Protein backbone atom coordinates (compact mmCIF):
# COMPACT_ATOMS: atom_id res chain seq x y z
CA UNK A 1 0.00 0.00 0.00
CA UNK A 2 1.23 3.50 -0.80
CA UNK A 3 2.68 5.64 2.00
CA UNK A 4 0.22 8.28 0.79
CA UNK A 5 -3.34 7.17 1.43
CA UNK A 6 -5.56 6.85 -1.64
CA UNK A 7 -9.33 7.18 -1.81
CA UNK A 8 -11.09 6.09 -4.98
CA UNK A 9 -14.46 7.82 -4.91
CA UNK A 10 -17.69 7.30 -6.80
CA UNK A 11 -17.45 3.52 -7.12
CA UNK A 12 -20.60 1.72 -8.24
CA UNK A 13 -19.71 -1.76 -9.52
CA UNK A 14 -18.10 -4.87 -7.99
CA UNK A 15 -15.40 -4.88 -10.70
CA UNK A 16 -14.21 -1.37 -9.95
CA UNK A 17 -14.41 -1.92 -6.19
CA UNK A 18 -12.18 -4.97 -6.64
CA UNK A 19 -9.80 -3.02 -8.88
CA UNK A 20 -9.45 -0.26 -6.27
CA UNK A 21 -8.72 -2.76 -3.50
CA UNK A 22 -6.15 -4.65 -5.59
CA UNK A 23 -4.44 -1.40 -6.58
CA UNK A 24 -3.90 -0.45 -2.94
CA UNK A 25 -6.61 2.09 -2.17
CA UNK A 26 -6.94 2.79 1.55
CA UNK A 27 -10.50 4.11 1.20
CA UNK A 28 -13.42 3.51 -1.15
CA UNK A 29 -16.04 6.22 -1.64
CA UNK A 30 -19.71 5.56 -2.44
CA UNK A 31 -21.78 8.57 -3.49
CA UNK A 32 -25.33 8.74 -2.17
CA UNK A 33 -26.64 11.86 -3.92
CA UNK A 34 -29.41 11.51 -6.49
CA UNK A 35 -28.14 14.30 -8.79
CA UNK A 36 -24.76 12.63 -9.24
CA UNK A 37 -23.99 10.22 -12.11
CA UNK A 38 -22.17 8.18 -9.44
CA UNK A 39 -25.21 7.82 -7.17
CA UNK A 40 -25.76 4.45 -5.52
CA UNK A 41 -28.64 3.50 -3.24
CA UNK A 42 -28.06 2.44 0.36
CA UNK A 43 -28.73 -1.20 -0.50
CA UNK A 44 -26.14 -1.06 -3.30
CA UNK A 45 -23.56 0.44 -0.96
CA UNK A 46 -24.08 -2.40 1.49
CA UNK A 47 -23.66 -4.98 -1.28
CA UNK A 48 -20.57 -3.30 -2.71
CA UNK A 49 -18.93 -2.81 0.68
CA UNK A 50 -19.65 -6.29 2.07
CA UNK A 51 -16.70 -8.13 0.43
CA UNK A 52 -14.17 -5.32 1.00
CA UNK A 53 -11.31 -6.33 3.33
CA UNK A 54 -11.54 -4.83 6.83
CA UNK A 55 -8.35 -2.77 6.39
CA UNK A 56 -9.93 -0.76 3.55
CA UNK A 57 -12.23 2.08 4.64
CA UNK A 58 -15.73 2.42 3.21
CA UNK A 59 -16.94 6.01 3.03
CA UNK A 60 -20.45 7.19 2.15
CA UNK A 61 -20.44 10.60 0.45
CA UNK A 62 -23.56 12.68 1.13
CA UNK A 63 -24.73 16.25 0.57
CA UNK A 64 -26.64 18.06 3.33
CA UNK A 65 -28.11 14.75 4.54
CA UNK A 66 -31.09 14.29 6.83
CA UNK A 67 -30.74 12.11 9.91
CA UNK A 68 -33.16 9.62 8.35
CA UNK A 69 -30.89 9.26 5.30
CA UNK A 70 -27.83 8.77 7.49
CA UNK A 71 -29.64 6.22 9.64
CA UNK A 72 -30.48 4.22 6.54
CA UNK A 73 -26.87 4.31 5.37
CA UNK A 74 -25.45 3.42 8.77
CA UNK A 75 -27.92 0.64 9.53
CA UNK A 76 -26.03 -2.20 7.86
CA UNK A 77 -22.72 -1.49 9.59
CA UNK A 78 -20.77 -1.65 6.31
CA UNK A 79 -19.46 1.92 6.51
CA UNK A 80 -16.38 3.16 8.32
CA UNK A 81 -16.93 6.92 7.73
CA UNK A 82 -19.37 9.54 6.48
CA UNK A 83 -18.18 12.29 4.13
CA UNK A 84 -20.17 15.53 4.10
CA UNK A 85 -20.00 17.38 0.80
CA UNK A 86 -22.62 20.11 1.25
CA UNK A 87 -22.97 23.22 3.38
CA UNK A 88 -22.90 21.38 6.71
CA UNK A 89 -21.77 23.60 9.59
CA UNK A 90 -19.22 22.49 12.19
CA UNK A 91 -22.10 22.09 14.64
CA UNK A 92 -24.04 19.87 12.24
CA UNK A 93 -20.95 17.79 11.49
CA UNK A 94 -20.27 17.28 15.20
CA UNK A 95 -23.90 16.31 15.81
CA UNK A 96 -23.74 13.72 13.01
CA UNK A 97 -20.56 12.23 14.44
CA UNK A 98 -22.07 12.05 17.92
CA UNK A 99 -25.35 10.51 16.81
CA UNK A 100 -24.07 7.89 14.39
CA UNK A 101 -20.76 7.00 16.01
CA UNK A 102 -18.82 7.09 12.75
CA UNK A 103 -15.81 9.24 11.79
CA UNK A 104 -16.90 12.27 9.78
CA UNK A 105 -15.02 13.78 6.87
CA UNK A 106 -15.87 17.26 5.57
CA UNK A 107 -15.18 18.49 2.06
CA UNK A 108 -14.03 22.11 1.94
CA UNK A 109 -14.59 24.01 -1.31
CA UNK A 110 -11.46 26.01 -2.13
CA UNK A 111 -10.96 28.96 -4.45
CA UNK A 112 -8.83 31.29 -2.30
CA UNK A 113 -6.51 30.95 0.70
CA UNK A 114 -9.29 32.22 2.95
CA UNK A 115 -11.31 29.10 2.19
CA UNK A 116 -8.51 26.98 3.67
CA UNK A 117 -8.24 29.19 6.75
CA UNK A 118 -12.00 28.94 7.26
CA UNK A 119 -11.67 25.17 7.56
CA UNK A 120 -10.16 25.68 11.03
CA UNK A 121 -13.74 26.09 12.26
CA UNK A 122 -14.16 22.32 11.84
CA UNK A 123 -11.26 21.45 14.16
CA UNK A 124 -12.60 19.06 16.79
CA UNK A 125 -15.89 18.62 14.92
CA UNK A 126 -14.68 16.29 12.15
CA UNK A 127 -12.04 13.61 11.75
CA UNK A 128 -10.72 14.64 8.34
CA UNK A 129 -10.95 17.55 5.90
CA UNK A 130 -10.88 17.19 2.13
CA UNK A 131 -9.79 20.27 0.21
CA UNK A 132 -11.67 20.23 -3.10
CA UNK A 133 -12.13 22.72 -5.92
CA UNK A 134 -15.03 25.12 -5.53
CA UNK A 135 -17.59 24.49 -8.27
CA UNK A 136 -19.22 27.37 -10.16
CA UNK A 137 -22.29 29.00 -8.64
CA UNK A 138 -25.40 27.15 -9.71
CA UNK A 139 -23.53 23.95 -10.61
CA UNK A 140 -25.61 20.80 -10.21
CA UNK A 141 -22.86 19.01 -8.29
CA UNK A 142 -20.70 20.18 -5.38
CA UNK A 143 -17.75 18.09 -6.61
CA UNK A 144 -16.69 15.30 -8.94
CA UNK A 145 -16.49 17.65 -11.92
CA UNK A 146 -12.78 17.30 -12.62
CA UNK A 147 -12.00 20.82 -11.43
CA UNK A 148 -8.81 21.68 -9.54
CA UNK A 149 -7.82 24.66 -7.45
CA UNK A 150 -4.46 26.40 -7.11
CA UNK A 151 -2.48 23.85 -5.11
CA UNK A 152 0.07 26.46 -4.03
CA UNK A 153 -2.62 27.82 -1.68
CA UNK A 154 -1.78 24.90 0.62
CA UNK A 155 1.94 25.68 0.78
CA UNK A 156 3.08 26.49 4.28
CA UNK A 157 -0.42 26.16 5.72
CA UNK A 158 -0.72 24.36 9.06
CA UNK A 159 -3.96 22.39 9.13
CA UNK A 160 -4.95 21.24 12.61
CA UNK A 161 -7.19 18.41 11.36
CA UNK A 162 -5.99 15.43 9.29
CA UNK A 163 -6.65 16.30 5.65
CA UNK A 164 -6.56 15.19 2.06
CA UNK A 165 -6.50 16.67 -1.43
CA UNK A 166 -9.28 16.29 -3.99
CA UNK A 167 -10.41 17.88 -7.23
CA UNK A 168 -9.13 17.33 -10.74
CA UNK A 169 -6.53 14.71 -9.84
CA UNK A 170 -5.32 12.07 -12.31
CA UNK A 171 -2.37 9.78 -12.93
CA UNK A 172 -0.86 12.53 -15.08
CA UNK A 173 -0.80 15.26 -12.43
CA UNK A 174 -0.78 13.46 -9.09
CA UNK A 175 3.01 13.60 -8.65
CA UNK A 176 2.95 17.39 -9.04
CA UNK A 177 -0.05 17.68 -6.72
CA UNK A 178 1.71 15.74 -3.98
CA UNK A 179 4.98 17.62 -4.48
CA UNK A 180 3.28 21.02 -4.20
CA UNK A 181 0.89 20.28 -1.36
CA UNK A 182 2.50 17.47 0.64
CA UNK A 183 -0.93 15.88 0.85
CA UNK A 184 -1.02 12.79 3.10
CA UNK A 185 -4.17 11.54 1.36
CA UNK A 186 -5.41 11.97 -2.21
CA UNK A 187 -8.98 11.48 -3.39
CA UNK A 188 -9.84 10.82 -7.05
CA UNK A 189 -13.13 10.35 -8.88
CA UNK A 190 -13.52 11.72 -12.41
CA UNK A 191 -9.77 11.29 -13.02
CA UNK A 192 -10.19 7.51 -13.13
CA UNK A 193 -13.27 7.46 -15.37
CA UNK A 194 -13.86 6.78 -19.06
CA UNK A 195 -17.16 8.74 -18.91
CA UNK A 196 -19.04 10.55 -16.11
CA UNK A 197 -19.83 7.95 -13.47
CA UNK A 198 -18.07 5.12 -15.35
CA UNK A 199 -14.93 4.05 -13.52
CA UNK A 200 -12.07 2.53 -15.57
CA UNK A 201 -10.11 -0.31 -13.94
CA UNK A 202 -6.96 0.52 -15.90
CA UNK A 203 -7.11 4.18 -14.86
CA UNK A 204 -7.62 3.17 -11.24
CA UNK A 205 -4.51 0.98 -11.41
CA UNK A 206 -2.50 3.71 -13.15
CA UNK A 207 -3.49 6.34 -10.58
CA UNK A 208 -2.55 4.15 -7.63
CA UNK A 209 0.75 3.21 -9.28
CA UNK A 210 1.56 6.89 -9.84
CA UNK A 211 0.85 7.70 -6.19
CA UNK A 212 2.97 4.77 -5.00
CA UNK A 213 5.89 6.12 -7.04
CA UNK A 214 5.83 9.45 -5.20
Image (spheres, rainbow, N blue to C red):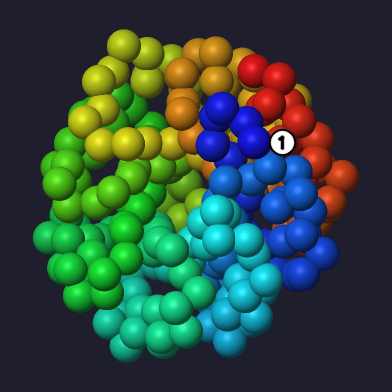
To which quarter of the image does residue 160 belong?
top left
Q: Is residue 162 left or right of residue 166?
A: left
Does residue 184 show up?
A: yes
Residue 26 % position (x, y)? 57, 46
Q: Is residue 84 above or below residue 5?
A: below
Q: Is residue 130 left or right of residue 161?
A: right
Q: Secondary structure at mark 1?
A: helix
Q: Is residue 83 above or below residue 39?
A: above
Seen from this angle, which residue lies furthest front? Answer: 54
- Residue at 64% x, 45% y is 25
Does residue 139 show up?
A: no
Q: Is residue 114 above or below residue 97?
A: above
- Residue at 73% x, 26% y is 210
- Residue at 63% x, 61% y is 53
Q: Is residue 88 left or right of residue 121?
A: right
Seen from this angle, which residue lies furthest right? Answer: 202
Q: Is residue 102 left or right of residue 191?
A: left
- Label 1 sits on residue: 208
**Circle 1 crowding by C-alpha within 10 Å: few under 14, some 14–19, many from 20:** many
Residue 27 % position (x, y)? 55, 51
Q: Is residue 197 above or below residue 5?
A: below
- Residue at 40% x, 61% y is 81
User: Which quadrant is home to the N terminus?
Assistant: top right
To which quarter of the image does residue 117 belong?
top left
To which quarter of the image does residue 39 belong?
bottom right
Residue 132 % position (x, y)? 45, 40
Residue 186 % position (x, y)? 54, 36
Amino acid sequence: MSRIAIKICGLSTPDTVGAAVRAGAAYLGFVHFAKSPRHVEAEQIRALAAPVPPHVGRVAVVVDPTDDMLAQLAAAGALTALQLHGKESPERAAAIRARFGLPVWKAIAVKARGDIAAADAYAGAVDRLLFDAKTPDGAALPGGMGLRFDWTLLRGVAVATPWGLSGGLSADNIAEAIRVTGAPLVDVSSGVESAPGVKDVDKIAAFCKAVAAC
